[in-house]
Amino acid sequence: MKKYIAFFRLRFSMGLQYRAAALAGISTQFFWGAMEILMFRAFYRTNPDAFPMTLRATCAYVWLQQAFLALFVTWVLEHEIFDAILNGNIAYELCRPISIYNMWFSRNLAQRFSGALLRCVPILLVAAFLPAPYGLMAPAGLLNFFLFFLTLLLGVGVTVAFCMLVYMLCFFTISPMGLRIVTVSMVEFFSGGVIPLPFLPDGVREVVELLPFASMQNVPLRIYSGDLQGKDMLRPLLLQIFWLCLLVAVGKILDALAMKKITVQGG
């Protein structure tokens, strides 16, 4: 376990060095969040009662989404891993007395947390001082606040576990490009990255909420804003735990299969 904690610490400290990139990301996310909120405001002005979430809850969803963007986007993948698989440098990793899956998992976690840490505080502070209903509201309650952090961690775990499937499947493909394009597009929509899932038609939403993508950013952001309350918070929480365990188990199986079939060519 100490080995993987060391990998986490090294990658985390490395991620904190990219302050200029974080500053550029903060400005981009401010503008993107503002554009989203203005778009939603235009729709809400036509018929406020036609939407499943209040404008205030939707604005909180958008600001939290931008603040913790680095935690949940699946296009934040390590190019080093793909390069190592393609060019054969994975042989160096195999020489170490470690689990490839565990090492990559800890590195991915560190990369996401370091990126989010640099960006979330300025965005949350500014959003909190914006006038209602366009700013970041306080959590819907003490229980919501606690479950927000719990489901946030579980959501990050589900996201990383899903990304690990992408890495492991690359052992069985010629090029990872097609796989990356499909998975990024799929996760972006079905996780609530484009629009919050409550805005989907009821029949579609009920199916999408059962998928692993809904256990990523969708759950913590809706719990914080109060869109999920009381008993409605229990089912998504249990689904997060279920998908985290299942995705990790499938990733471990793919890891074992890949290690048996891997062939490194060259001299």
Image (cartoon, rainbow, N blue to C red):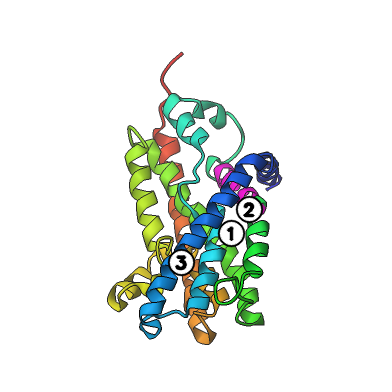
Of 39 and 136, nearer the camera is 39
Asked whether the viewer can see residue 199, the reply is yes
Amino acid type, label 1: Ala
Is 70 displayed left or right of 2 in the figure?
left
Mark 3 or 1, nearer chain start: 3
- Residue visible at 66% across and 50% down in the picture: 118
Q: Which mark is residue 119?
A: 2
Of 26 and 210, nearer the camera is 26
Q: Are marks 1 and 2 in contact (CB under 8 Å)?
A: yes
Residues drawn in magenta? 102-117
Q: Let me know if residue 105 is in the magenta part.
A: yes
Q: Main secondary structure of the magenta part?
A: helix
Q: Are marks 3 and 1 in contact (CB under 8 Å)?
A: no
Q: Let me know if residue 53 is in the magenta part.
A: no
Q: Which mark is residue 38?
A: 3
Q: Are marks 2 and 3 in contact (CB under 8 Å)?
A: no
Badge count: 3
Mark 1 burial class by Cα count in 10 Å: few <14, some 14-19, many 20+: many
Mark 2 or 3, nearer chain start: 3
Q: CA distance from mark 2 to mark 3?
A: 22 Å
Mark 1 or 2, nearer chain start: 1
Of 201 and 153, nearer the camera is 201
- Residue visible at 32% across and 32% down in the picture: 174
Q: What percent of the width, then of the height, locates residue 221?
A: 53, 69
- Residue visible at 44% across and 42% down in the picture: 167
